[in-house]
């Protein structure tokens, strides 16, 4: 996978390194040439500054002139009189052939020399220096000129890394903003001054795509809601007509056949109601959070579904698990309607799949400053391989009895996700029954509730 950051850093660092190498090469050779000119100037200065008392007859007995350390550079001095007789040369050095006045480079006994000669009034002075010494000294001087560049290159590379990372930071921020969004948040991404000009066309195009997706999603939700709403009335009327016909005897047929018709009609009515609930949950972009008593919702849910439980002779009750006490009303910040729908769906699902004579408990829990509830039944449970799949829409395993549509648990999961809650299904120990656990509701103390009121 290609990375803009890597390509940008690669080109910048490689280009900068190549430019620095070329610059270093140029600086190095320029410094060497300037050092060579400096050494030539040194030869000329030595030749012109020799004392005039070096006369014929002094020879090698004459003391060496004070060169102030220049002799350390192996400078060879030779002087001839006007007749061409050598009258002086540096001690412990082989004499060199005489060259014309000016600068010259020549080879002598497999060594290269650089000389400067000058004709004075009564003598000819020649100053020579080995080319190898000059090259060594010039190399040292040139290398000394490169150390600022050697320090600057890594500093500049680090600076490039920081600048590129900071320059691409808005892209990362935009990615993090989109990743943190909810899957149903299709509103436009805000365009403020923090968005660079280069990213504005991308953000505009993204907002346009989000707007089109929102329109399509809204049309789909509206269609489902309208279709379910239009189906609910005729289905309810059809059920009433079926019940009336069965009572007055105008509908004749086998009881088994009419029972199947009524069962399928009830299943269809329940499916329409669930589709309406699902469309209502999907249509709410924002969660209307308010203070609500979880215990009051639990009591209402037990009351609403008690008749359905009595039809199957199921023991339906409310329990409080410590540290929840009898005086604890469990105030939470949530959407009361959505939380009630979540609780009713889980209880209804447990009642439908628990055999007659069973038991279902709605248990209020509190853990680490957060409250929740468990719906515990002693029904057949769910095979482990289907525990996660049953939360998908319209999924029903082959082993499941009854006339469900596969939407009850998916609606419960959708509501839990909107509230930021955790819904977990697990089989009870011993393989008998199922526990649907909802946790993560934020507790609101009485002072907070009074402040809101």
Image (cartoon, rainbow, N blue to C red):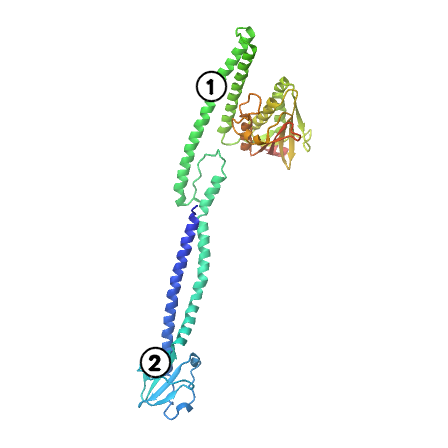
Q: For residue 352, which numbered disc appears in the image?
A: none
Extreme bottom residue here?
57
* Between 449 and 437, the one nearer to me in the picture: 437
In this view, the residue farthest toward the top is 249
- 315 to 54, vertically: above or below: above
Q: How many marks?
A: 2
Side of 58 relative to 434 (left or right): left
Q: x%, y% of residue 440?
A: 60, 34
Q: Looking at the image, which is closer to me, 108 or 435?
A: 108
Name the residue: 44% across, 28% down.
218
Based on the displayed image, in which of its 4 quarters is residue 191 positioned? top left
Distance CA(mark 2)–CA(mark 1): 113 Å
Question: Which residue: 31% across, 82% down?
Answer: 101
Residue picked out by circle 1: 230
Q: Position of residue 312 (x, y in %)?
A: 63, 18
> Measured along the vertical axis of the image, is residue 160 above or below residue 278?
below
Please give the residue where the numbered disc 2 appears in the rendered image: 116
Mark 1 neighbour density, 10 Å: few (under 14) some (14–19) many (20 or more): few
The quadrant of the image that shows the N terminus is top left
> What secondary structure is marked by label 1?
helix
Residue 376, percent from left and from top: 64, 27
Q: In the rendered image of this protein, does residue 60 appear above or below residue 228? A: below
Q: Nearer the viewer, residue 300 or 216?
A: 216
Residue at (53% x, 11% y) in the render: 242
Where residue 93 sits: x, y (%)? 41, 84
Mark 2: few, some, or many residues within 10 Å (few <14, many ≥20)? many
User: What secondary structure is found at the residue carrying circle 2?
Assistant: strand
Question: Which quarter of the rendering shows the C terminus?
Answer: top right
């Amino acid at each position: 996978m290609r990375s803009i950051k890597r390509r940008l850093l690669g080109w910048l660092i490689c280009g900068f390194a190549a430019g620095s190498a070329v610059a270093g090469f140029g600086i190095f050779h320029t410094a060497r040439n300037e050092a060579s000119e400096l050494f030539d100037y040194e030869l000329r200065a030595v030749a012109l500054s020799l004392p005039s008392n070096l006369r014929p007859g002094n020879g090698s007995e004459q003391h060496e002139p004070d060169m102030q350390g220049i002799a350390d550079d192996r400078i060879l001095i030779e002087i001839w009189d006007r007749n061409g007789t050598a009258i002086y040369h540096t001690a412990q050095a082989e004499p060199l052939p005489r060259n014309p006045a000016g600068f010259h480079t020549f080879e002598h006994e497999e060594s290269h020399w650089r000389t400067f000669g000058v004709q004075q009034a009564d003598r000819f002075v020649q100053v020579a220096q080995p080319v190898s010494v000059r090259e060594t000294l010039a190399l040292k001087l040139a290398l000394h000129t490169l150390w600022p560049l050697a320090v600057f290159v890594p500093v500049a590379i680090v600076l490039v890394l920081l600048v590129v990372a900071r320059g691409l930071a808005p892209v990362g921020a935009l990615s993090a903003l989109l990743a943190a969004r909810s899957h149903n948040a299709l509103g436009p991404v805000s365009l403020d001054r923090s968005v660079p000009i280069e990213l504005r066309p991308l953000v505009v195009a993204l907002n346009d795509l989000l707007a089109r997706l929102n329109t399509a999603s809204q049309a789909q939700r509206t269609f489902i809601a309208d279709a379910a709403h239009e189906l609910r009335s005729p289905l309810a009327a059809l059920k009433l007509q079926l019940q009336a016909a069965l009572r007055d005897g105008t509908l004749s047929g086998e009881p088994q056949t009419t029972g199947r018709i009524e069962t399928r009609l009830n299943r269809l009515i329940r499916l329409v109601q669930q589709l309406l609930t699902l469309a209502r949950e999907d249509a709410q972009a924002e969660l209307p959070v308010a203070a609500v008593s979880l215990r009051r919702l639990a009591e209402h849910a037990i009351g609403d579904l008690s008749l359905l439980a009595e039809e199957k002779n199921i023991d339906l009750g409310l329990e409080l698990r410590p540290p929840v006490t009898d005086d604890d009303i469990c105030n939470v910040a949530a959407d009361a309607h959505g939380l009630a729908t979540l609780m009713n769906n889980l209880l209804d699902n447990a009642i439908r799949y628990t055999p007659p004579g069973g038991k279902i408990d709605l248990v209020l829990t509190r853990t680490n400053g957060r409250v929740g509830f468990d719906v515990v039944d002693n029904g057949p449970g769910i095979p482990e391989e289907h525990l996660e799949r049953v939360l998908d829409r319209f999924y029903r395993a082959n082993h499941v009895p009854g006339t469900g549509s596969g939407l009850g648990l998916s609606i419960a999961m959708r509501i839990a996700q909107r509230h930021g809650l955790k819904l977990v299904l697990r089989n009870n120990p011993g393989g008998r029954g199922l526990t649907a656990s909802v946790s993560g509701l934020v507790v609101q103390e009485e002072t907070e509730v009074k402040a809101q009121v």
